[in-house]
Image (cartoon, rainbow, N blue to C red):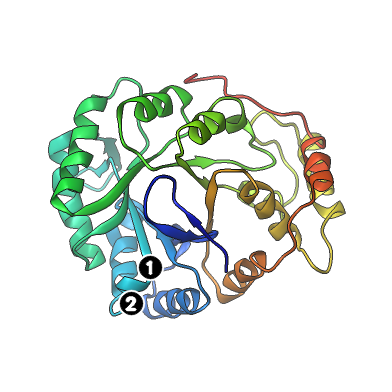
Amino acid sequence: MNYHLLGRSSLTVSEVGFGCMSLGSNDGENARLIHSAIDGGLNYFDTADMYQKGFNELTVGKALRGRRDKVILATKVGNQWRADGSGWEWNPYKQYIISAVEQSLKRLQTDYIDLYQLHGGTIDDPIDETIEAFETLQASGKIRYYGISSIRPNVIREYVKRSNIVSVMMQFSLLDRRPEETCLPLLRENDIALLVRGALAGGLLVNNPAKTYLQYAEGEVHKAQAAIQAISGINRKPAQTAIRFVLQQKNASTAVIGIRTMEQLKEMFAVTQSPLLTDKEIMYLRASVPVNYYDQHR
């Protein structure tokens, strides 16, 4: 397993992270999967308080009993479930964040969170108040570091400028290269880690039938699929090629992949053993479809 430093932090994370959102409803099965992941070298586990209305944190917490010191545990905050369970409201205010972390700590059965992330964000948020909440939690020792999960360049710029975030989680893949225009250079300049989600483009880069995706027509998606297939083979399956493409970004610390079965976990282990893409292969993939750009929140 390969490991990378998470930006300016002291955290070292496995290059493939365990996306806990995909876990099922059986605690025993989830524990076996998580234990196997840890035994195989995965140490970054990413959840959120809103996943399954808190059950995801609960099941992860149960699975990590006795193994907490073996992992880098990340969760997220900002989406507050309505009392009637009908949906959630965006809540980036300090009072809520300070109270929400207590519930996450309880569900996760831990007294600290390694990486606490704002789960979204808008340019109209009380950003300084949100930052103050994270700084307060960091000073108290309840979180070690904080970051943001966002695809909005205008929001990311503000947090880079005004806060001490160590990471940004962004959707990024061969079919979503929007971060390349401004966000990735900004993160590199400020030594902020990129946590990649969506590296497989919802399965389109692996085995799902081609369909329209973001700004890409079905035919363009098919071209991306064909390019992935063309440079894959015995030593590197399509999923591994797609993940390697994002991991070979200069400041990409980990690709967070949703894992629900032992078969999927084994395939993620194989990513770390698969050959790196050559410069020629990366250029070939990049040339397979035109680059896309953010058209909102710029």
Per the image, label 2 sits on a secondary structure element best described as: loop
Residue 276 placement (x, y as % from top left): 73, 57
- 10 Å neighbourhood of mark 2: few (<14), some, or many (≥20)? few
Residue on which disc 2 sits: 67
The structure residue drawn at horizontal position 75% and vertical position 45%, both measured from the top left corner, is 210
Residue 202 placement (x, y as % from top left): 61, 49
- 10 Å neighbourhood of mark 1: few (<14), some, or many (≥20)? some
Residue on which disc 1 sits: 71
Instruction: Out of 34 and 180, give the one closest to the viewer.
Output: 180
Q: Is residue 188 above or below residue 4?
A: above
Residue 273 placement (x, y as % from top left): 68, 69
Q: CA distance from mark 1 to mark 2?
A: 7 Å
Q: Quadrant of the N terminus?
A: bottom right
Amino acid type, callout 2 = Arg
Q: Is residue 222 above or below residue 163?
A: below
- To which quarter of the image does residue 249 belong? top right
Per the image, label 1 sits on a secondary structure element best described as: loop
Amino acid type, callout 1 = Val
Tags 1 and 2 touching, CB below 8 Å: yes
- State left or right for residue 278 relative to residue 193: right
Q: Is residue 98 above or below residue 127?
A: below
Instruction: Out of 131 and 109, give the one closest to the viewer.
Output: 131
Residue 197 placement (x, y as % from top left): 53, 48
- State left or right for residue 128 relative to residue 7: left
Mark carried by residue 139: none
